[in-house]
Image (cartoon, grey):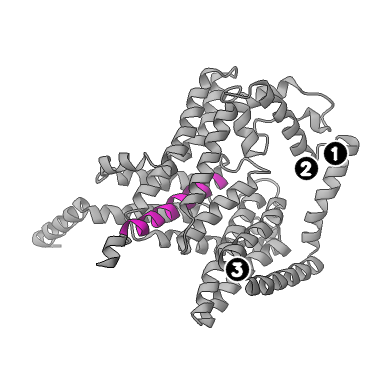
Amino acid sequence: MTALARETTLQMLGRRIRSPAAWGETVDLFAILTVASLPWSTSLVAIFNAAFLVCMVPFLDVHAFMQSLKRPISAAPIALFLLALVGTLWSDAAWGARLYAVGPTVKLLVLPVLLYHFERSPRGHWVFLAFLASCAFLSVMSWLVAFYPHLSIKPGNVERGIFVKNYIDQSQEFTLCAVALAYPIVRVLRAKRYWLAALLTSLALSFFANMAFVVVSRTALVTVPIMLAVFALLHLNWRSVLIASAAIAAGALLAWQASPQLRKTADTFASDYSRYVEKGESTSAGLRLEFWRKSLGFFAEAPIRGHGTGSTRGLFEQVVTGNNDQASHAVIGNPHNQTLYVAVQWGIIGVVILYTIWFAHLWLFRGDGLANWIGLLVVAQNVFTSLFNSHLFDFHEGWMYVLGVGVAGGMVARVRREAPTPEEGRS
C-alpha cells in the first residue's frame, strides 16, 4: 500500500471513529451479538454486553440520558437495585452472602441504557431477528442431541435434547419465540402473503414440536396456554378465537397422544404433589410448596423491610427438620417464587417496587405493533413464570427480560416520539 493510500485509509478510519453514527452501529452490533449468544453462553453475554456499554460512552448525551432515567420504566428497576444495596445494612448474613445477593439485581441497571439507546436506534428489529435465528439453530441442535446424545457439549450428565445449558432455559426461549410469531403470522395472513405466513407458521410449530417430543419444562406447559390466550384476546375477533382454540386443542390432543415425553412431564405434577403430601418427600413440586410455606413465615416476621439482602439461606438453615430425603430438610437461598424472593429480603417495600416494575412495563406496551407485542409477551412471560421461579433474578431469564423489555421499550418510545402531535396531524 502506498503512503498516500495509507494516509487516506487512516483519515477515513479516523472520521468513522469520530462519527456518532458509526458508534451507534457498533453499539447495535454488540446488542445483536449479546442476544444471539444468550441461548448458548453466559460468558459471551457478559463480554458482548460490556462492549455494548463501553461503546455507548463516547457519544452519550448525558443530559438526555439523565432525563430518561426519571421515567418509571427506568427508575423502578434502578430503585430495586438500590434497595438490594441498602438492604445489606440490616442483614444478619455474612458480608460475602450479602454482596453475592446484590449481584442478580445489577442487570436491572442495563435496562434503562437499552431503553435510551433503542429509542434512538432504528435497528431494534435486528436484535429480535438475531434471537429468533439463534433459537431456531438451537432447536436443530436439540433434535440432533435427542438422537445423538454424544453431540452435547453440556458438562456432566447429558439431558435429553439439551445441547447446552438446561431444559428450563431452552423451554423459556422456545416458548417466547413460538408465541411471539403469532403476531406476524396473523399480520401477513391479513395481507394475503400466504407463503411468508406458511414459513413463519412452520417455524413456530417447530418450536412447539421440540417441546412436545424432545423436552419441555413444566413451567412452560403452564404458561404457553396463558400466553396464547393473551394473544387471542388482544389481536383476534371472537370467530378467529374459536377457530384458533379448536386448532390448538386438536394439536395439543395429537401431541398428547403421540408424545410419551409430554405425558411423562405432565404426570409428574400429580405424582410429585402426592409423594410430598403423603411422605414429605423432596420432589420438585414438594420442595416448592415447602419453600413457599417457610418463606411466608419469614415474611411475616419482618413484613416492612424484610430480613435484609442475602438473608434467605440463613433463615432456611434455622428451620431445618427431618432427614435428607424430606423436603423440610432442604436449605436454599431462592424460594422459587419472585414475590417471596423479594418479600423475605426486602419486605413489602421490595414487593411494591417489584410490582411497579411489572406494571410500568406492561403499561408501556399497551399499543399495537410488533414491538409492543414482543415487549408485552416478555413481561407477561416473566410475571407468569415467576409464580414458580425467581426468573427476574436468574441469569438467563433475567437477561431475557432486560434485553426484551429494553429493546422493545426503546422501539416503542421511538415511535411515540416521532408520531405527529394532534396539532401537527390537523395542519
Mark 1 — residue?
Answer: 276
Which is more toward the observer, 32 or 389?
389
**What's the amino acid at mark 3?**
Ala
**What's the amino acid at mark 1?**
Tyr
Q: Eyeballing the image, is 122 above or below 90?
A: below
Q: Eyeballing the image, is 135 above or below 402?
A: below
**Residue 405 colored magenta?**
yes
Marks 2 & 1, CB-CB < 8 Å contact = yes
Left or right: 397 as drawn, with respect to 21: right
Left or right: 151 as drawn, with respect to 6: right
Q: Position of residue 189 (x, y in %)?
A: 54, 78
Q: Is residue 7 visible?
A: yes
**Dot placed on the residue nearer the N-terminal end, 1 or 3:** 3
Mark 3 — residue?
Answer: 204
**Dot placed on the residue nearer the N-terminal end, 2 or 1:** 1
Distance from disc 2 to disc 1, alpha carbons, whole Å, reads 8 Å
Which residue shows up at 53% across the image and 44% down it?
Answer: 358
Mark 3 neighbour density, 10 Å: few (under 14) some (14–19) many (20 or more): many
Which residue shows up at 55% across the image and 56% down it?
Answer: 377
Mark 2 — residue?
Answer: 285
Which residue shows up at 42% across the image and 46% down it?
Answer: 49
**What's the amino acid at mark 2?**
Ala
Q: Eyeballing the image, is 207 above or below 194?
A: above
